[in-house]
C-alpha cells in the first residue's frame, strides 16, 4: 500500500514539476464571434446590397424579395445579432411595402417583428418608428373617414412615443456603462 | 502386398452401396481399437502411418469438441480427495493439481497492477485539477452589443439597413479575427 502512495506522490510531483505554463488560449473563435455568425451576417449584407441595386433600378418587387430572404437566414442559436438584423430588415421591408401601397402587409411585418423581439433595442425602437409611419399612411388612405383618421394619427403618435422612450432608456443605460 | 485399400486417400472411391470388403472391415476394426485406446489415454504406437495418424488426430478433435471428455475415474477421485483434505486443514500432496484457496489469495500481482493504474489515473486527475495558470490568459474581447455599435436610429435613416449591416459586419469581422489571433 505504501508503494502505491509513493507512486501517487511521485506522479503528482513529476506532472507539476515539468508541466509547461500555458501560453495560448485554447478557446475556439466561437467563444466571441463564430464562423456561423459571420456567414449569416455576410449573407444578410449581400441581400441588402442586392436590394439596394434593385431599388436603384426601380425594381421594388425584386428588392422586397431580396430583403425577405434576410428574414429566413439561419443564425447561430442564441446570437443576439439575429434579432437585431432581422428587425432592421423588417423596418426596410415595411417601408418598401408602404411605398408599394401594401400598407396592411407592412403593418403585419412590423407587428411580427415586435412580437418576436425578446428585448428592447434601437432596432425595436426603429420598428416603432416605422409603425408610426404606417399609421400615418393608413390615415392618409382613410381621408374619407375622419374618425378613423384621428385613430390612426393617435396610433402613430403612440408608436413614435414608444420609439422615443426606448431610445432614451437605452441611451441612459449605455451612458451608465451597462 | 499393397492393395487399393492400403491407400485410402489416392485409391479408387468405392460405390456408395458397395459392400465393404473383408480387408476394409479389418482395417476399420483395427482403427476403431486404436481410437478407443487413444481416447482412453494410452499412447498411440510410434509406428503409425501418416494417414492413420491424421485420422486419429481428427477423431481426437471431434471427441474433444463434443464436450464429453471426462477425466478418468481414478484421477477424478484423487482430485476430489485432495480438495476435501485441504478443506479440513490437511496438506495436499506435492503432485496434486488442486491449488489451495489460501494460496490463490496470495495472487497479488494483478491487484498491484490495477492498483498502480488507478493511482496513476487519480494522479492525472489531481494534476489537471490543481494545475491552474499562474496568470489567467485574457479571453478574446467580447463583441459589443449592436445597440452600442449602431446607436439610436433617426427617422430619416429608418430604412438605411444596408449601411448598418455593413457596420455590423465589419465590427464582427474584427472580433472574429481577433479571436482567431490574427491581425485584421
Image (cartoon, helix red, strand yellow):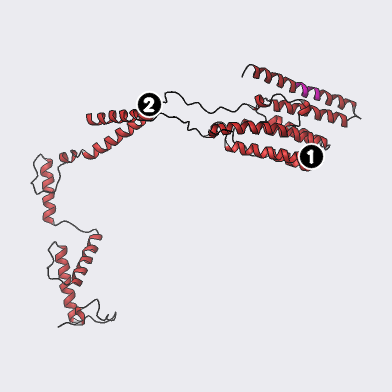
> For mark 1, what is the residue?
A55
- Residue A99 place in picture, x, y as percent: 82, 35
Q: Foreground residue, B96 or B69?
A: B96
Q: Residue at x 61, y 34 (%)?
A: B173
The magenta segment: A155-162
Instruction: Give the foreground label among 2 and 1.
Output: 1
Q: Residue at x 80, y 39 (%)?
A: A56
**Quarter location, residue B105:** top left
**Extreme-front residue of the structure:** B183
> For mark 2, what is the residue?
B130
10 Å crowding of disc 2: few (<14), some (14-19), many (20+): few
Residue B18 visible to an observer of this rendering: yes
- Image height of B35 relative to B7, above or below: above
**Quarter location, residue B66:** bottom left
Q: Examine the residues drawn in magenta and state their main secondary structure.
A: helix
Q: Pinpoint the chain carrying mark 2.
A: B
Amino acid at each position: 500500500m505504501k508503494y502505491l502512495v509513493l507512486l501517487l506522490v511521485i506522479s503528482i510531483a513529476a506532472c507539476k514539476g515539468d508541466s509547461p505554463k500555458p501560453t495560448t488560449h485554447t478557446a475556439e473563435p466561437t467563444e466571441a464571434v463564430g464562423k456561423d455568425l459571420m456567414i449569416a451576417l455576410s449573407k444578410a449584407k449581400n441581400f441588402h446590397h442586392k436590394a439596394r441595386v434593385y431599388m436603384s433600378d426601380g425594381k421594388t418587387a425584386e428588392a422586397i424579395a431580396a430583403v425577405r430572404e434576410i428574414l429566413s437566414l439561419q443564425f447561430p442559436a442564441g446570437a443576439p445579432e439575429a434579432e437585431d438584423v432581422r428587425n432592421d430588415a423588417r423596418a426596410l421591408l415595411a417601408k418598401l411595402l408602404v411605398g408599394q401601397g401594401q400598407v396592411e402587409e407592412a403593418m403585419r411585418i412590423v407587428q411580427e417583428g415586435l412580437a418576436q423581439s425578446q428585448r428592447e433595442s434601437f432596432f425595436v425602437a426603429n420598428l416603432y418608428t416605422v409603425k408610426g409611419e404606417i399609421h400615418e399612411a393608413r390615415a392618409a388612405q382613410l381621408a374619407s373617414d375622419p374618425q378613423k383618421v384621428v385613430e390612426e394619427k393617435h396610433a402613430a403618435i403612440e408608436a413614435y412615443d414608444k420609439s422615443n422612450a426606448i431610445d432614451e432608456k437605452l441611451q441612459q443605460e449605455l451612458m451608465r456603462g451597462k | 502386398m499393397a492393395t487399393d485399400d492400403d491407400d485410402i486417400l489416392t485409391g479408387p472411391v468405392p460405390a456408395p452401396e458397395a459392400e465393404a470388403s473383408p480387408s476394409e472391415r479389418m482395417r476399420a476394426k483395427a482403427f476403431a481399437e486404436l481410437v478407443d485406446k487413444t481416447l482412453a489415454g494410452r499412447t498411440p504406437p510410434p509406428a503409425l502411418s501418416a494417414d492413420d495418424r491424421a485420422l486419429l488426430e481428427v477423431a481426437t478433435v471431434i471427441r474433444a469438441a463434443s464436450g464429453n471428455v471426462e477425466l478418468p475415474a481414478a484421477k477424478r477421485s484423487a482430485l476430489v480427495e485432495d480438495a476435501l483434505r485441504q478443506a479440513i486443514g490437511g496438506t495436499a500432496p506435492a503432485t496434486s493439481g488442486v491449488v489451495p484457496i489460501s494460496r490463490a489469495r496470495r495472487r497479488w500481482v494483478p491487484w498491484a497492477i490495477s492498483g498502480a493504474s488507478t493511482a496513476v489515473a487519480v494522479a492525472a486527475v489531481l494534476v489537471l485539477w490543481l494545475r491552474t495558470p499562474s496568470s489567467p490568459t485574457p479571453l478574446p474581447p467580447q463583441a459589443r452589443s449592436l445597440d452600442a455599435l449602431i446607436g439610436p436610429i433617426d427617422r430619416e435613416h429608418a430604412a438605411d439597413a444596408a449601411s448598418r449591416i455593413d457596420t455590423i459586419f465589419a465590427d464582427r469581422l474584427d472580433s472574429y479575427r481577433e479571436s482567431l489571433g490574427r491581425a485584421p
